Image (cartoon, rainbow, N blue to C red):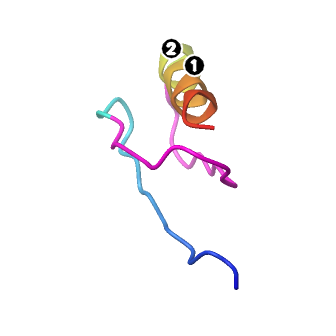
Amino acid sequence: MSNPTTYIHLVPESDRPTIAVGPSRFVVVIEAEVSHEWQKLVSEWIVCKR
């Protein structure tokens, strides 16, 4: 049985929510211009949760 799909909408420059630690798959879609710092924070947030 596969895990259910969870969608997380991040508003640019907002706090990142707590997510479960463990194997995950992420698709990141950026529809607005965001700072390089924000991109870095989101990338680190994803990597640290794996």
| Nearer to us in this view, 25 or 27 | 25
Label for residue 37? 2
Q: Nearer the viewer, residue 43 or 29?
A: 43
Q: Residue at x 58, y 35 (%)?
A: 46
Q: Which residue in the protein does label 1 denote?
A: 40
Q: Amino acid at mark 2?
A: Glu
Position in image of residue 42 (x %, y %): 52, 30
Q: Position of residue 29 (x, y in %)?
A: 62, 51
Q: Which residues are magenta?
A: 16-34
Above or below for 26 versus 44: below
The residue drawn where x is 69% and y is 79% is: 2
Q: Secondary structure at mark 1?
A: helix
Q: Position of residue 25 (x, y in %)?
A: 70, 55
> Which quadrant of the view contains residue 40?
top right
In the figure, 47 relative to 37: above or below?
below
Left or right of 3 on screen, residue 7: left
In the rendered picture of this protein, how many numbered marks are placed on residues?
A: 2
Give amino acid for label 1. Answer: Lys
Please tell me the numbered disc located at residue 18: none
Q: Quadrant of residue 16?
A: top left
Q: Element type at marker 2? A: helix
Image quadrant occupied by the N terminus: bottom right
Is the Cβ of the residue at disc 2 closer than 8 Å to that at disc 1? yes
Task: Between residue 43 and residue 38, name the one nearer to us.
Answer: 43
